[in-house]
Image: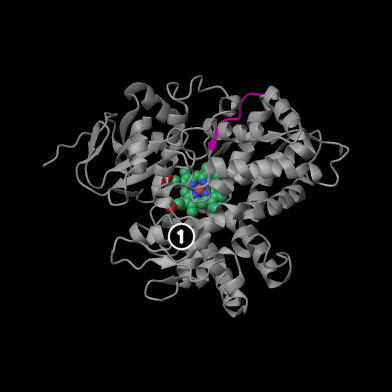
Amino acid sequence: MTTVRLPPGPSAPRIVQGVFALTAPRRRMRRLRARYGDAFTINVPIFGRAAVICNPAEIKQLFTAGPDVVENLQPNLGRVLGPGSLFALTGDEHRGQRRLLTPPFHGRRLAAYERIIEEETVRELASWPEDRPFATLPSMMRITINAILRTVFTGGGANGDVAAGSLGVDLARLRELLPQAVTLGSRLLMLPVPQVDLGWWSPWGRFWAMRREYDAIVERLLAAAARDEKLDERDDVLALLLRSRYDDGSPMRHSDIADQLATLLAAGHETTATTLAWAVERLRRHPGVLRDLVAEMDAGGGALRAATIVEVQRTRPVIGLVGRHVKVDGYRLGRWTLPKGATVLAGISLLHADEAVFPDAGAFDPYRFLDTQPDLHEWVPFGGGTRRCLGAAFANMELNVVLRTMLRDFTLIPTTERDERWHFRGVAYAPAKGGRAVVRRRATRPGMADGAHMRAPQARAARWTERGTSEGSARPERAEACAGDTSTATAATSGATTATGGTTNSIRATTTP
Ligand code: HEM
């Protein structure tokens, strides 16, 4: 029998540790890190004993372990998004769905979305007040929800005017419904699921009512897509899922498509919006960086902006931890031996704050990434391995376009106010005051009206996105980190299926979008 060797940790009862974890999660983690070092064990309700690791070599080992050794954390977001969600799927089913969903969020397709993101940003920023403080987070939420809705349901607007007809009405309703459902769902994540639906009076009842409305809208959109004679030519994600077939030729169930779309919509907006609000918060407190960014943008550059995005995500990662569930007995992870069923949490914030990994880690210093890309086992805001964020490249492109458009059209006024505190919203950490800004509209400068000045930075931003974040980069550690994402556009759309010969029915696209 293998001897279990868990990292050391506090002996306080589970309930006491649970209260700490809920009330002061960040402070608690930092204290445990200071006391026990770069690996410790906590004992909390729902997860039980969980090893928290923030040693880069051990995190790398965890992320590169295969799905036969570790799987997604249990329970996870699939609890609120549904059994068809990428978060809930495991093994071959998970791999098949990732192959299917990767192309719409990577490579050449990203350039097509830049236009809609800039459009959404300009539209939203038109209502920004001048010379008085306001929280930018609500604006960032509206930009990112609109961007992901258009991407998922219209393929970037390629299927017609999103504001027109019944599609426009349905998208308008989803635009209201989804942020409310995501906020409520994030809070319910750790609460027990009741056996009976107590209706609008209970949080779960309210959540289920929202979910029923969402399902009805998606069902309408699926029915309309099924009637569409041009379904095979469409490049939106809904059409892609509707056309896909399992190995035995059967289509995906509509309920599974709805779960998967909900996953993309939910995962795809709040995280990006909170990162943008943090970017505003950081830049207002670093006027030198802000000045350099504006000068670079005016000169048609984008390298410092790309580095700034990396540094914002290092110093203010919106997801603090990602977890894995151990599937084998006696799993050796670095110095530790973990039992089957154990939970391992990779401490993103702790790793990013490690002086040994990032010297002067507490400083906000985008220049550290100006000529060098981060190691993707040390810089892990998107997690890693076969579960690494599917939307990482999309998110970085979106961050780049929104930031660029904001700096082009507005002067962000610096502040000497204290840093905004971290506020936990259920899944993501946001600046407590919503990334407050004071702005002034910039005068249009000569040569800027025709949009010609945009072309060079856009091209550069796209290149950075490809180089720095897209799947399948040439960097060896990158390739390893995404071992499960070998799906290039070609493989994914040519119906590549799993080679393991497992009994699970895997999924593929039947037509090339
Ligand atoms: C700054 C923005 C974002 C951040 C910080 C972020 C972060 C994360 C993290 C930490 C994970 C878990 C990774 C792991 O377990 O190793 C994840 C998973 C995921 N994210 Fe994101 N995300 C962002 C934006 C997006 C966007 C825009 C989309 C949609 C296009 C998206 C879709 C997903 C999906 C589908 C998963 C589940 C992947 C799987 O289980 O295979 N995310 N994200």
Q: Is residue 437 magenta?
A: no
Q: Is residue 205 above or below residue 330?
A: below
Magenta residues? 417-423
Q: Quadrant of residue 52?
A: top left
- Image point (58%, 33%), residue name: 312
Q: Is residue 51 left or right of residue 227?
A: left
Most common secondary structure along the magenta stretch? loop
Q: Amino acid at mark 1?
A: Ala
Q: Is residue 30 above or below residue 339?
A: above
Q: Is residue 94 visible?
A: yes
Frontmost residue, 331 versus 232: 232
Q: Is residue 470 left or right of residue 135?
A: left
- Image point (65%, 64%), residue name: 171
Q: Quadrant of residue 53?
A: top left
User: x, y (%) of residue 62?
Assistant: 33, 40
Q: Which element is circle 1 on?
A: helix
Frontmost residue, 414 versus 98: 98
User: x, y (%) of residue 186?
Assistant: 49, 49
In the rendered view of the protein, which quadrant contains the N terminus?
top left
Q: Is residue 349 above or below residue 73?
A: above
Q: Is residue 201 visible?
A: no
Q: Is residue 503 above or below residue 334?
A: below
Q: Is residue 123 left or right of residue 460?
A: right
User: x, y (%) of residue 368?
Assistant: 56, 25
The 10 Å Cα crowd at callout 1, few under 14, some 14 to 19, many 20 or more, is some
Task: Residue under label 1, please give it.
Answer: 491
Frontmost residue, 323 versus 66: 66
User: x, y (%) of residue 12?
Assistant: 29, 31
Q: Quadrant of residue 499?
A: bottom left
In the rendered view of the protein, which quadrant contains the C terminus?
bottom right
